[in-house]
Image (cartoon, rainbow, N blue to C red):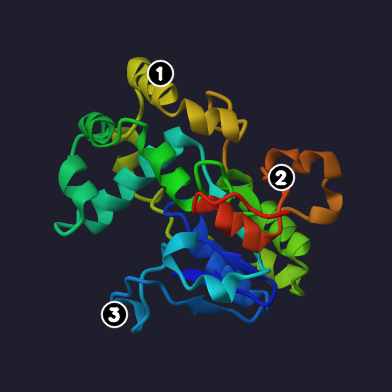
Amino acid sequence: MALALPNSVFFHIPRTGGTWVRHAIKNAEIKSYEVNCFFCKKSSEYNNTSYFHNNFDTVNTSVLEGKFRFAFVRHPLRFYQSIWKYKMVCGWDKDNDFDMACASDSFEEYVDNCFKFSERGMVTSIYQWYLGEDLSYVDFVGKQEYLYLDLVTALTLAGENFDEEKLFSTSLKNNFSGNIDLPEQCEYSPALKQRVLDREEWVLKIFNYEDEPVDFIPNVNISNTNSSSNNHYYQPPLTLPLPLRGERRKGKDPEY
């Protein structure tokens, strides 16, 4: 599902800090609700709500009209590691095509399987599904590496009213770095690292990622941060009103 706020909608890409974003929005006292999707799967695990992970074309778009849409991404090298660590802790899903095609206790074999599963690159495919191949599904893309600052930026651009202090006090969620063995088991060899960088060239180029990932930047006092340091986020150009952008995604020429 997407998370609707008074002026905006958050699209939750897996392993990019979205669980923290949901908690931070709640802690910041912003009213929100889950937007129904077209393939709702009831589950007691989600308190009778459907999937948290949906894109623009799989939710009730009438609810989204006129709202500011945002999402988060992370460096491809870290994304592969994060998915693998999550699956190693929580288990591979036998009903998930990706899991069954890519599952492995060996990180390198898992990455190889991902390459076979997605010719474009797993991360590229996932990001394009959520954001649109031309990034037209969203108005703002923040980076997991700058999660706190970029969420504040997104909410501010959307015109949301929120308690910034409570947002910054939100603790990290869904973090598996505490498992002592997993980080060592998913280190990249130079050759494997280069293969991932080559395969995910689109992500690196579009979001201005360097070959070497930066460390996660924890919460900081945004008032002490130089405004020029916020240039890391990506904001797609808004050349069309939101409803017309929807028509363009369906292959129609918008009427100006």
According to the picture, the residue beneath numbered tag 1 turns out to be 194
Q: Along the horizontal axis of the image, is 76 left or right of 112?
A: right
- Could you tell me which secondary element the residue under label 3 belongs to? loop
Q: Residues within 10 Å of mark 1 (few under 14, many from 20)?
A: some
Q: Which mark is residue 237?
A: 2
Q: For the residues marked 3 and 1, what is the alpha-carbon distance in whole angstroms?
A: 41 Å
Name the front one of labels 3 and 2.
2
Q: Residue 159 at x, y = what percent?
A: 78, 68
Residue depicted at x 46% and y 55% = 13
Q: Residue 10 at x, y = what percent?
A: 57, 64
Q: Earlier in the sequence, mark 1 or mark 2?
A: 1
Q: Quadrant of the N terminus?
A: bottom left
- Could you tell me which secondary element the residue under label 1 belongs to? helix
Identify whether 69 is placed above or below 105. below
Q: Quadrant of residue 64?
A: bottom right
Residue depicted at x 74% and y 69% = 165
Q: Residue 70 at x, y = what percent?
A: 61, 58
Q: Along the horizontal axis of the image, is 195 left or right of 103?
A: right
According to the picture, the residue beneath numbered tag 3 turns out to be 42
Q: For the residues marked 1 and 2, what is the alpha-carbon distance in whole angstroms?
A: 31 Å
Q: Quadrant of residue 234?
A: top right
Residue depicted at x 57% and y 28% = 205
Q: Amino acid at mark 1?
A: Gln
Name the front one of labels 1 and 2.
2
Of residues 159 and 92, the one nearer the viewer is 159
